[in-house]
Image: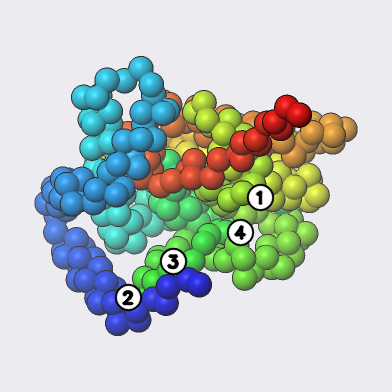
Amino acid sequence: MAKQRSRAADYIVYVIVRYVVCVVQLLPWSLALGLARGLAWLLFRIDRKHRLIAIDNVRHAFPDLDNEAVDGLVRASFVHLTTMVVEMIRMPRFVRPDNISDYFRHAQPDDLELIRRWVATGRPRLAMMGHFGNWEVLGYATGMAGFKGGIVARRLDNPYLDRFLARFRRMSGLELLDKNADYALILDMLGRGIGLGMVGDQDAGPRGMFVNFFGRPASTFKSIALLCLEYNAPIMIFGAVRVGHPMQYVIYLEDLILPEDYADRPDAPRAITERYTQALERLIRRHPEQYFWLHRRWKTQPKVREKKKAA
């Protein structure tokens, strides 16, 4: 039986977060970014659980790195995470539809026009991201650029923080959807030709499809590929990479997967899942310090069948 959460503890955490948010909003950029680095230094030392998870993940993903390089990459990922949070807090005060180009640019000049052409077709679209770069500001920038649609996300366990984060996500003008509670609405929106953004690198548990990710089997949700095929919805794999401060980002359209290219293949769901997973891996390998190594992406592993004993 799952352990019951303490509403009082959740609320205390929420109050602390709101206090930090107020402080970060009042600081100039230089001090806010300095605070992010200080928090990263502190978390690296006190959060032993996630530090060890990150070290293990990096060692598996980059077996040629020595201990010093692994340590440096993990420290950089902590800094990236805390900087990402600071940017999320400050973004509503700085980024508007009329100045979006001051903070975000596309890696290829024609990518934005390509996206607009696909929107004009009226076909549903699946915008795929990983826990890479700043996936939260990517959704915000999408809405600020004038695109309509929805964001599929998992609710936070802390209900107070969940509502607080939901308000930020809705500021972009995109509709926020719970991947479990709003599944019928997700299907309805795809049926009406509406685009949806989602994260595609979460552990899917023992029922997921195992595909190769950084040389290890990773349990991955099959539903993304199935929705792509059922609703004839192209999958666009995106990544928002920080290239400078404050909040200077390059948006990569890493791959475009068309369901019609897999229509006659019996292994279509696996082939599509493998392809978008490989696209995410390519993005991460170019900027490994901007990946969320702290989460247990390889938590679930295939069961090893015991060999039958000889009679």
According to the image, label 3 marks what residue? Answer: 156
According to the image, label 4 marks what residue? Answer: 149
Q: Are marks 2 and 3 in contact (CB under 8 Å)?
A: no
CA distance separating discs 2 and 1:
31 Å
Disc 3 marks which amino acid?
A: Leu
According to the image, label 2 marks what residue? Answer: 10
Disc 4 marks which amino acid?
A: Gly
The mark found on residue 59 in the picture is none
Q: Is label 3 in a helix, a strand or a loop?
A: loop
The mark found on residue 207 in the picture is 1
CA distance separating discs 4 and 3:
21 Å
CA distance separating discs 2 and 4:
31 Å
Q: Is label 1 in a helix, a strand or a loop?
A: loop
- Residue at horizontal 24 percent and vertical 24 percent from the top: 67
How would you rate the neighbour count of disc 4 (Cα within 10 Å): few for under 14, some for 14-19, many for 20 or more? Answer: many
CA distance separating discs 2 and 3:
11 Å
- Residue at horizontal 78 percent and vertical 44 percent from the top: 229
Disc 2 marks which amino acid?
A: Asp
Residue 256 position by quadrant: top right
Q: Is label 4 in a helix, a strand or a loop?
A: loop
CA distance separating discs 3 and 1:
22 Å
Residue 14 position by quadrant: bottom left
Q: Are marks 1 and 4 in contact (CB under 8 Å)?
A: no
- N-term-proximal mark, 2 vs 4: 2
- Which mark is nearer the camera, 1 or 4? 1
Q: Position of residue 228 (x, y in %)?
A: 73, 46
Disc 1 marks which amino acid?
A: Arg
Note whether 263 is above or below 14 in the view shown. above
